[in-house]
Image (cartoon, grey):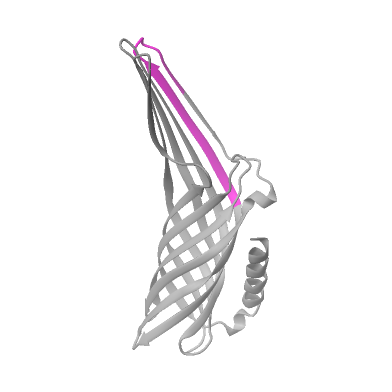
Amino acid sequence: MKTLIKTTTVIAGLIISANVNAQSLNISGGVSNSKLIFDGISTGSSTENYNGTTYTTNLSYKGATNATFGLSYEFNLGNRLSLETGGRFMSRGFTETYTREIRGPQYVANAMERTSYKLNYIDIPLILNTAITTGDLRTYVRTGIYAGFMVSSKYSTYWEESDSDGYSSTYEYSDTDMGMDTEERITGGIQLGLGASYKQFYFETNYSFGHFTLSDFDSGITTRDLSFTLGYKINFKKK
């Protein structure tokens, strides 16, 4: 992972420093859905019965949907190939919901805890576009790698519980300082996608998967990102 990130960053830096040879400057924005998968942690429901009382628990994870935008340089490598790199703002995160119900003959108690993480990254992708051009229409396949660095984060939790005896309680907390060290802020992985452009406008869908760790969790975390973006190319050179 560290080798992948270093390689991506160095190559992208060299390409950007030579931007006088770029074909275009690409500006894009859209929406992304991020899902975090925790190694060894399973979701679902369980129910147990003991002395006439039923205990039901449920654990679920939901991905985060956020805005994404980017700025990149694209370099021609012939009629069909181009190399693209730059920077992209990407939010990753999840919402975990845990519920518990205790139901007896004369007593019912419920509890719910909802925890959310939002991790904001600047990604540096290095993408090879392979295209087929028909007139002004260009369709292409995107393959590459990316490195990312977390620039900000937010953690929030909400807890509520109640029972049939009239007891109820709620608790809410949020923080933007998660105390992460440099290694925890770094991520990287593989990116695949499809795109289509007409003249200077383009649409892309990208899917990326990577890996990182957080000290709040004992297991590693795998990321899955699906994004849809619209963009505009500022051409520097004629094809």
Q: Position of residue 217 (x, y in %)?
A: 59, 41
Q: Which residue is found at the position 43% from the left and 40% from the top?
A: 43
Q: What residue occupies the far left of the structure in this picture?
A: 105
Nearest the camera: 112 or 150?
112
Q: Position of residue 115 (x, y in %)?
A: 48, 36
Q: Is residue 40 visible?
A: yes
Q: Is residue 30 above or below residue 80?
A: above
- Asked if residue 237 lies left or right of residue 134, the reply is right
Q: Is residue 79 above or below residue 82?
A: below
Residue 164 located within the stretch drawn in magenta:
yes
Q: Position of residue 86 (x, y in %)?
A: 56, 69
Q: Is residue 103 visible?
A: no
Q: Position of residue 30 (x, y in %)?
A: 41, 61
Q: Which residue is found at the position 58% from the left and 44% from the top?
A: 219
In this rendering, the count of numbered labels is 0
Residue 36 located within the stretch drawn in magenta:
no
Q: Is residue 118 above or below residue 106?
A: below
* Magenta highlight range: 151-170
Rendered-image quadrant of the N terminus: bottom right
Q: Which residue is found at the position 42% from the left and 21% from the top?
A: 161
- Is most of the magenta stretch helix, strand or loop? strand
Nearest the camera: 47 or 216?
47
Nearest the camera: 42 or 82?
42
Q: Which residue is found at the position 63% from the left and 77% from the top?
A: 15
- Asked if residue 170 lies left or right of residue 105, the reply is right
